[in-house]
Image (cartoon, grey):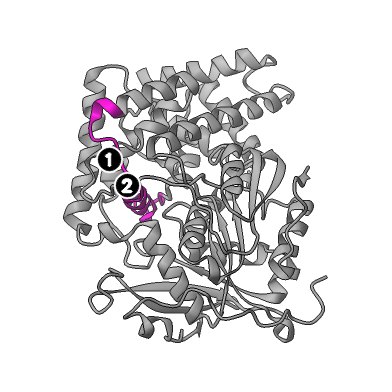
Amino acid sequence: MRTLRITGAALLGLALLTACDGGGDAPAKSAAPSTPPAAGLDAFYHQKIDWRSCDGGFQCGTAQVPLDYAKPGAERVTLSLIRLPATDTAHRIGSLLTNPGGPGGSGVEFIRDSGRAFDEKLRARFDLVGFDPRGVGSSAPVRCLDGAGLDRYFATDSSPDDQAEVDALASVSKGFADACKAKAGAELPHVGTRDAAHDMDVLRAALGDSKISYYGASYGTYLGAVYADEFPGNIRALVLDGAIDPRTSSTDILVEQAKGFETALQAFIADCVKQSSCPLGTSAPAATQKISDLLTAADKTPLANRRDSRKVTESWAAMGIATSLYNKDFWPILRQALTQALTQRDGTLLITIADQMVERKQDGTYSNQTDANMAVNCVDKPNPADLATYKKAADEARKQSPRFGPFVVWGGLPCVYWPAQTKQAPKPITADGSPPILVVGTLRDPATPYKWAQGLASQLTKGVLLTLDGDGHTAYLQGNACITKATDAYLIDGTPPAKGTTCH
């Protein structure tokens, strides 16, 4: 399940399926940034964004950054931005830069879709700003496969049972990497998280902020942590929600993520067996077996699909189930999808849900989320050098997460063949010299396990962990009043919650 490497916070399209006091004076101006621009970057840091109205009260603009920070006078990349201006201009603090995750999630679409979901107290004090990172959305997007190519890629059996299926998966994965090399080879070495973190500091200056205020979800926590590693003295406040542990290797991330989805599935099953509409029965062990049997059956004979010509293979079905675990509000949809699949061998709703994960449109085209996701992940950390090493990780994942392990781990296989590689091993991030940084973790988060939030908070010299005893991916913007209050107070006043705070 290649897309389970995507750890985006916003699966807003899936929600459509459910249709069947910040007053007081502004804080004093923060001190000048402690980390000045590197040589040759003054023009980028001193640029001004030309904001223009782009409907609905939003303003859009662009900013320029160097493709290669080692060669700032060479090729440039244009980053797309959007902002929702603060509602209380007299008490405006500055800009709150955001990232919804992925990698590959559009920050522009995130603010356009979710900007008004932020708490009113926060919206009063900050311009909410989203940006498409380099290689993403409308910021020099990486493009590799067309719609038909991605359909074939996602339909390929990513839980191989024999060598022939392993070879087929290796072939389609190498084809993905080769297509990216052919279409975006020059860009690929420069789409990693460290480059994007340097872009954020350029944006901080272009937005007119001496120090950055930032909210990052899921992968956005890794981006924020790398920023803190590079520019600890330029931080005003950082919220890292649904955290990734920077120490984790490229394959260990996938194994742990698979375990997270297994935990979330058990939480869904425990709830489902209490519901009269549950198609899995009343016993949790029997319900788990029914889902395993459904996936095994789909592996042999794909489920029907009434929307288009695609067959709902085991991979599509597993992706649909996993996508529904991102938010507890989607559990009723999953019950409905499983009912159709189990009683009618109809996978239409499952593949419709999966399409939301990979941002496939009804006309068969895709956003560039999948291409960008692979491009960033493959260049960020060292990858196994051969297929045999990768197979060992997948076999280990199968033991620890029988339903999701192979799908998740085999999803990273294109990175073995990726044309741009790094030798920089993962390392802890301490961000020495930063102010307190707020790390938010959810106990039963499927995509970013809670242990990662614990790990990141413990690494950071001034990390503070805020816990949600709940289900779903990320905590802020999920409607929990305790999380909202604590996060907003930190962003507005700079005061983190007390150590050990848990919200229910």
Left or right, 347 with reference to 166: right
Q: Position of residue 140 (x, y in %)?
A: 32, 67
Q: Quadrant of residue 56?
A: bottom right
What residue did someone put label 2 on? 378
Residue sitting at x 51%, y 44%: 245
Left or right, 339 with reference to 487: left
Q: Secondary structure at mark 1?
A: helix
Give the alpha-carbon distance from disc 1 to disc 2, as whole Å.
Answer: 8 Å
Query: Can residue 419 be seen here?
Result: yes
Q: Position of residue 172 (x, y in %)?
A: 23, 36
Is residue 387 shown in magenta? Answer: yes
Tell me: residue 170, above or below residue 401: below
Q: Which residues are magenta?
A: 360-389
Residue type indicated by callout 2: Cys
Tell me: residue 293, above or below residue 93: above
Foreground disc of the pair 1, 2: 2
Q: Quadrant of residue 45?
A: bottom left
Q: Which mark is residue 357?
A: none
What residue did someone put label 1 on? 414
Crowding near the residue tagged with mark 2, few <14, some 14–19, many ≥20 C-alpha atoms within 10 Å: many
Q: Secondary structure at mark 2?
A: helix
